[in-house]
Image: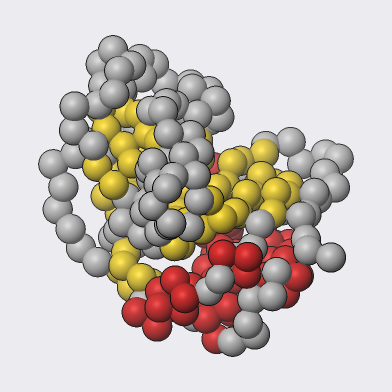
Amino acid sequence: MTVARAIKQDSTIPFGIAETPEGLSAIHQPGCAATIWRRSPLPCFQSWIDGLAPEQLPKTRVILSPDRVCDALLEITKSFGMPDCDERTMLVEDVSALAAIFAEVMDAAYLRLRLGAINNNACREFHIDAVTARLVCTYRGTGTQYGFSTDGAEPPRIFTVPTGAPIVLRGTLWPEHPRSGLLHRSPPIEGTGETRLVLVLDPITDPHPEPDPEVITRH
């Protein structure tokens, strides 16, 4: 199952636009500060997740190997009262697939996974993350915003990643210099009544010893 279908779209922005998940590996190309897998949500999935009460949206912070993501998310989604249906399976399988894809792209044995509902102005300032690279996918609500700035100020033009489209961004620990000037932020939504569901993946390269997951569940 999948939560989205791939779409083709030209772009004048100087970074990778992937038409398939394999295209996310373009992040390793010289000068590529980010790459987006352009896909649009399936209407049945988007209607379902948009219609859920905010308290049913799962929240977790966990470090684990990609092959453990599916089982962990099954437990987490159940604990938050997500209905047992095809769309929940789509979400679990899609996050699991993105974890496997990103781990392969980054050659990472483990990932730091964050999934959470956001209804405020989290990370509203434009910035670069203190990681080697990060994958962000917004399943519900407004996607990550980005733009180019040569002096660290707010970009003169701001773009928004489509809902359901994963973006991989280089961080400050990426070995290539100088940096491209690509900055990003969470969209300012406080006071709008919007609740976003956002997945964030960071690579963890040291597989020994295996970290114990920190899973937030509802009791």
Q: Position of residue 181 (x, y in %)?
A: 31, 22
Residue 171, placed above or below residue 28: above
Q: Residue furthest front?
A: 191
Look at 44% across and 71% down and name the residue there.
50
Looking at the image, can residue 114 be seen? yes
Query: In which quadrant of the rendered view does residue 140 lie?
Result: bottom left
Question: In the image, 89: left or right of 155?
Answer: right
- Identify the residue at horizontal 24%, vertical 42% (top origin): 159
Looking at the image, residue 70 lies above or below residue 203: below
Image coordinates for residue 185, horizontal then vertical, percent: 40, 36
Q: Residue 92: give x, y in percent of width and height.
A: 60, 71
Q: Is residue 170 left or right of residue 34?
A: right
Determine the image quadrant of residue 164: bottom left
Rendered image coloring scheme: secondary structure
- Image-quadrant location for residue 193: bottom left
Is residue 186 rendered to the left or right of residue 12? right
Whether residue 113 is situated above or below residue 40 in the rendered picture: above
- Taking 54 as reference, is 127 left or right? left
Q: Is residue 169 visible?
A: no
Which of these two is toward me, 76 or 194? 194
Q: Nearer the viewer, residue 208 or 122?
A: 122
Question: Which one is in front, 127 or 50?
Answer: 50
Q: How many marks?
A: 0
User: Residue 75: x, y in percent?
Assistant: 76, 70
Say which residue appears at 63% left-offset and 65% top-offset: 55
Q: Quadrant of the C terminus?
A: bottom right
At 29% from the left edge and 47% from the top edge, which residue is drawn? 160
